Image (spheres, rainbow, N blue to C red):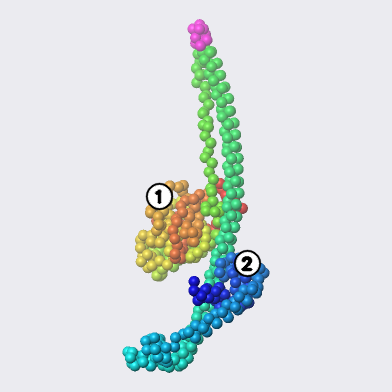
Amino acid sequence: MSQASKLTKLQAETKCNICLDDLKYPVTTECGHNFCHTCLTSFYEQWEELFPCPVCRHPCNVWNTSNNVQLGTMVEMAQGLYSLTSRNNSQETRTHCEYHNRVLTFFCEDDLQLLCDRCIRTGNRNNHQVTPIAQAASHHRRKLHRLIKSLQKKLKEAQELKTLQIKNSWKLRHQAEAQRKELTSEFQQLSQFLNREQKAAFSRLKDEERDLKQKLSENIAAFENHVSTVRGLFSHVVAGRAHSDVEILSRVKDFYQKSESLYTPDIIPAQIGREACNFPPQYSALQKLIQQFTVQVTLDPETAHPNLLVSEDRKRVTLLKKKQDHPRSSESFTDSPVVLGNPNFNSGRHYWEVKVGKKPEWAIGICKANLSPGARRSSSAPEKCWRILWQGDCFVVSGPADPNSKLKVTTPRTIGIFLDYELGEVSFYSMPEKSHIHTFRDTFTEPVCPYFYLRLHSEPLRLCSASDGGRKPTGGLNSDI
């Protein structure tokens, strides 16, 4: 390695990694990196006791930085050595033209090249701007000064952006740690819930086994009595056949009556009922989701089809046989009996419930909030719509990422809808049983809103609060989960 290369490397090692200038009153962090005292102080003022090293991002304690006097002395020595070398190099800078061996006295602004008087006469520079060296040097010193100012500004902006990015890195770490703690807590609650569910299910199974065992024992005793009765009657009849004609005929009526009155006990099947548990969706029990994420949803009359009547409290919608005689809104559906709900959702988790009655045909779900006029005039479901359609004995589920499919379930009375926007899920539950019907999984990129659809002969759809109907946890879903 040449002496110049070694000097360049030494000079790089004496630079501050924040201001990129020579170290001034250097201090050393726990991780071994060096900075100007002023630069590091300004940097860690934005943090608390711990701050990330600007070079390696190692968490450093403010109180564990130390002044590096020896390094400061080495920086001064390196500066002196560099100045001496620079002067020597300056003296060695050629002052004569390598082509004409004449003194370089001019500078070409177009080619940015030093020239001698013969270069001007022999070269093709008639239209070039050529100035004396002193004048050109003065001009370019001013330009370089402005360039230095510009680079200093860019350097400061770059350092600020780097600091911001380091903060974002720490913010990410803190957010991830907070979520880990939250998930740990939720899984602990879920584990406790499952343990309680298991104990309760085993207890119910034990009680049912005991009751059924008692019934089987009683039934076995009844069969033993029945067998004894039949055996006794059999013996009497066999013995009666040996009697005289008169005696047989005098007792035959009694034999027949006892035979006809024999009662055979029914067989009790040894069948234990299937133990069912309603497990919670995702990380928490459904009851917790209901308590924490219930929102008040209302119907938007401006979007309602002309045959749909929305109640004054905007909680109930009924399908009429005749269209209502009132001005139509540009946002209303014209061909499909649909009404949308408020509010729109573009983040977060939300839960609401809809009473649907006993009759088909209706559909509920969510759809893109900002529908085009063409979508509102269409007779089919909007392109961005996630809904379940009840047809009397089954659900037809349809969404942008789901092909139409049918689900056989018991007739629902109330539907609970849970939307997790960031997770890209909308789930449907039959309430108050809390049984899961279906979950759509997609990616939501635009605001969505509640969606309601009715057909003729359907009962009105009514929005209800999650506490309606005296709802109590069933199947072991405790409200304290």
Q: Is residue 64 above or below residue 415?
A: below
Q: Is residue 283 above or below residue 265?
A: below
- Tell me which residue sits at (51%, 31%) in the image: 269
Residue at (46%, 61%) from the top-left corner? 450
Nearest the camera: 330 or 395? 395
Give the image location of residue 202, x and y in percent: 59, 40
Which x, y percent locates residue 276?
53, 43
Q: Quadrant of residue 106?
A: bottom left
Q: The disc labelled 1 sits on which kind of residue?
A: Lys
Report the disc number at residue 441: none
Q: Label 1 belongs to which residue?
A: 406
Which of label 2 and label 1 is nearer to you? 2
Identity of the residue drawn at 52% across and 78% down? 155
Q: Does any portion of residue 354 appear in the rendered image? A: no
Look at the image and give the residue range highlighted in magenta.
Answer: 238-250
Q: Could you tell me residue 82's position as x and y percent?
A: 54, 80
* Mark count: 2
Q: Is residue 246 magenta?
A: yes
Residue position for label 2: 30
> Looking at the image, is 120 positioned above or below residue 10?
below
